[in-house]
Image: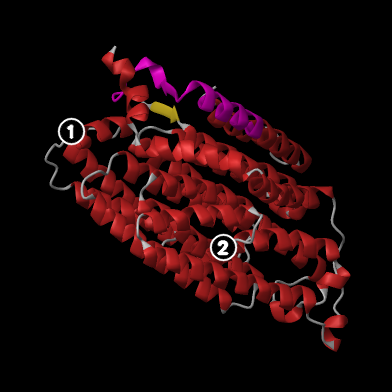
Amino acid sequence: MITMPLLIPLAALIISLFFYKKVKAHKLIGLFGSISLLVVAVFILTTVRSKGIMVMQAGGWAAPFGITLVIDLFSAIMLVVTAVVGVCVAFYSFTGIKEDRHRYQYFIFFHGIMLGANGALITGDVFNFYVWLEVLLMSSFGMLLIGGHKLQLEGGIKYITMNVIASVIFLAGVGVLYGQTGTLNMADLSMLIRGGSSLPYLNMAAILFFVSLGIKAALFPFFYWLPASYHTPPIAVTAMFAGILTKVGVYALIRFYTLFFHQDIQMWNIIFLVVAGFTMLVGVLTAASQIELRKIFSFHIISQIGYMIMGLGIYTPLALGGTIYFMAHNIFAKTNALLVSGLVQKKYGTFSLGKLGNLYREAPFIAFLFLIPALALAGVPPLSGFFGKFLLVKAGFDTEHYIIAGVSLLVSLLTLFSMLKIWDAVFLKHKTEYEMKVKTGNSFGFFEIFPVVLLALMSIILGIAAGYFIELSMEAGEQLMDNSYYINSVLKLRVQ
């Protein structure tokens, strides 16, 4: 079962190759593969919660000598969230992606992204994390550049350049870490470093990983590649990138700096808090100055990542649990907001705030669908964003981190302002005489409406049933704080 998150997208990718020019077959394989992956991910989550961490040593080689696959509660939650995004993007892409892009093997790259993301989430080895990250990035390069339009190529060059640089830095960190410890198994690293061994260059490795993963997660000051590239591809691609790619970088930061980078933990907590504050502020202030929907949401991706790093910097079970809950909320709400903006663009042919207006009267259903993720991102109760921010702010006040808690509250207000700005410009404002003459596009079908409704329901359910999901997130946060269970689960075969 632990290999199924890898085997399903790999099988879907291979089968799609046998239907190279069959667009309809690619679409059906994409839908079936993504739904199957979601079913398996839910089953894994329930199994891990009831029976404990799942571990597999590939080829029977005991850790730390072989390839280890590990699914704890944190990675199981992320597998489910990632699978939900995969299902929604697959449905939306059925009619929301043009046929010529499907003929360029869009769904093959889609399965490659799911394969790389799942591999990164369940690997127990730092080098294999790098390998899966490269699978993810190569697939994203292809998906980003499908179509070859000038704006896409320009954004793609920036995206590829920064991520290649980040990968080289990551690999340098792997080399330093292995040179210092002689192992790259995460559980073994944790045991070795926790044992108090003198490792003078360990912080050098930690810095290299921080810079590399900071680029991939779009943290301040490494975020500038994201708004320069995420607004260029079709909206389904942007939504998938927002929901999966940057969050894998955040996942790695949380995993690495809670599991095995124990030296100078107080110094790193301060660094994370400072970076989180600037990431939140710069992202939300820049978003408020934009006049194009995709660019606004691109900067909000950056801003919201700051909340996740805030939880890592506070470094308590409540903060880490709040981070996990917030990650799930943000992935659903941000993906949904982008897909809704795609509906707006399809109907009116533009993402520009200045050319839109009066949608509340012309398309009230779209207005309602936008309002849910917008209010969730702003943290308005009873939607999911309120509880995620509440947990993080409470963790900040409990540990007397008043400055970062205050910054997070300010950013929440600015996010609300930004969403109200969109609401006023797109849905309430009366159109000019010129804009009234602009022809509207086609209506929407099931494959575009269903994922938007599903993601809206996820934001509502996460809020209404917050008690259950907060309890689940807190269990995962406690496992991250006390990682002895993780270590024992991975290394027990070696002890035997």
**Picture coordinates of residue 229, whole percent (x, y):** 54, 65
Element type where label 1 sits in the image: loop
Residue 24: x, y in percent? 78, 41
39 in magenta: yes
Residue range corresponding to the magenta coloring: 37-66
Mark 2: secondary structure: loop
Magenta stretch secondary structure, dominant: helix
The one nearer the camera, 400 or 139, is: 400
Q: Which amino acid is tagged 2?
A: Tyr
Relative to 168, say whether 2 is above or below: above
Mark number for residue 230?
A: 2
Q: How is the image coloured?
A: secondary structure
Q: Which residue is mark 1?
A: 195
Residue 134 located left or right of residue 365 = left
The reply to whether residue 190 is visible in this rendering is yes
Q: Nearer the viewer, residue 47 or 236?
A: 47
Query: Is 403 positioned to the left or the right of 471 in the image?
Result: left
Quadrant location of residue 82? top right
How far apart marks 2 and 1 lie (CA) works out to 43 Å
Report the quarter where the N terminus lies: top right
- Please indicate whether residue 293 sits to the left or right of residue 443 in the image: left
